[in-house]
Amino acid sequence: MRKAMETVQPQKFVGPVLRGMDQEIIEAMLIAIEDDNPDAELLYEDRGGYVRIHTPRLCRVTRKSLEAVLGRSFRLADLEPSLSGFAGRMRYVGDEALEWYLERED
């Protein structure tokens, strides 16, 4: 379920901030993140110049989900130039997944 960020209560959210990406890729990221985080509330904020996509505590996107949505092969490393920022910590899980997470709760 997607919600605009300004409509939710403050929590600890993590996820990518994408800038300069093709709209097809941004929409694919939204769908793939929804698929890869089925129990998480997905928040998005489109500011024109960039898009934030966040979930509480852990946000994961897999190459497999992105490729399924796009209908073609896609390397996660191709996202890197458009990752203008992110919330939380980020780790690559090979070329299979990207994860944004909180190391601990303060």
Image (cartoon, rainbow, N blue to C red):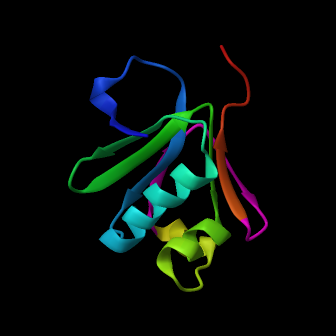
Quarter that holds the N terminus:
top left
Residue situated furthest right in the rendering: 94
Chain part drawn in magenta: 82-96
Is residue 22 visible to us here? no
Query: How many numbered marks have been drawn onto this rendered protein structure?
Result: 0
33 relative to 6, above or below: below
Give the left or right position of residue 12, taking residue 43 as reference: right
Tell me which corner region of the image, top left, top right, bottom left or bottom right, holds residue 14.
Answer: top right
Tell me which corner region of the image, top left, top right, bottom left or bottom right, holds residue 68.
Answer: bottom right
Residue 87 colored in magenta in the image: yes
Residue situated furthest left in the rendering: 48
Is residue 84 visible to us here? yes
70 relative to 47, above or below: below
Residue at the spot 59% in from the left edge and 85% down from the top edge: 73
Residue at the spot 53% in from the left edge and 44% down from the top edge: 15
Residue at the spot 45% in from the left edge and 66% down from the top edge: 28
Q: Between 15 and 42, which is closer to the camera in this rendering?
A: 42
Quarter that holds the C terminus:
top right
